Amino acid sequence: MKFGYVRVSTAEQNTARQEVLMQELGVDKIFVDKVSGKNMDRNELKNLLDYVREGDIVIVESISRFARNTRELLHMINFLKEKRVEFISKKENIDTATPAGKFMLTVFGAIAELERDYILQRQSEGISIAKQLGKYSGRKKIEIDKAKFEAVYNSWKAGEITATKAMLKLNLTRNTFYRRVKEYESRT
């Protein structure tokens, strides 16, 4: 069976172009993620890797949709190889069933990683310049109802709920939650 993997970086971005390509290529099932490709913590990618079996083919529009660094790309390709699953990247015309395809996969994986590093470097340089010009102050701080935070914080500190539950109740990421805890504790 043929399986397509489609990824865009944010929920607001459109997957239509990649999905049309998958239909044109005759894939049987499409797995779609709408998250950054910076790491492998992607639900549909995990589902795809669990789902495929010997003889299947995984098709992506381009390597950058599948992985953003060479190490993770090669790790996933090796995982697919161990399951005897073929990998095809349409844009780069890579087919891991051939020796040339395996070689080109490594080269294009390194290029995708370099491209991501350049993007991050340009972003950092732009932010630095904007800060110097007084035009950038970072992201807007997430507003949390103080009473709600205190109630959840107290439940967490009393051991009534886990930190994970506290984060979910407050709709905060791990880093933001612990940053807010530190701020709160320094005030009290």
Image: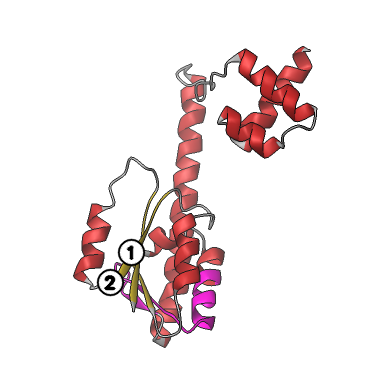
Res. 57 image quadrant: bottom left
| Label pair 2/1, CB-CB below 8 angstroms | yes
Specify few, some or many for label 2: CA neighbours under 10 Å numbering under 14, 14-19, or 20 or more.
some
Quarter of the figure that contains the C terminus: top right
Q: What is the CA distance from the residue labelled 2 to the residue labelled 1?
A: 7 Å
Q: Secondary structure at mark 2?
A: loop
Q: Residue at x 46, y 38 (%)?
A: 123
Res. 89 image quadrant: bottom left
What's the magenta region?
A: 75-95
Q: Residue at x 35, y 71 (%)?
A: 3
Please count the marks in the image.
2
Which of the pair 167/122 is nearer the observer? 167
Q: Secondary structure at mark 1?
A: strand
Question: Is residue 136 covered in magenta?
Answer: no
Specify few, some or many for label 1: CA neighbours under 10 Å numbering under 14, 14-19, or 20 or more.
some
Q: Which residue is mark 2?
A: 27
Q: Residue at x 58, y 15 (%)?
A: 145
Q: Can you give x and y, in whole percent of width and height, for residue 31 in the image?
A: 37, 61
Per the rendering, the mark at residue 30 is 1
Which of the pair 155/163 is nearer the observer? 155
**Could you tell me the amino acid type at mark 1?**
Ile
61 up-or-down from 16: above or below: below
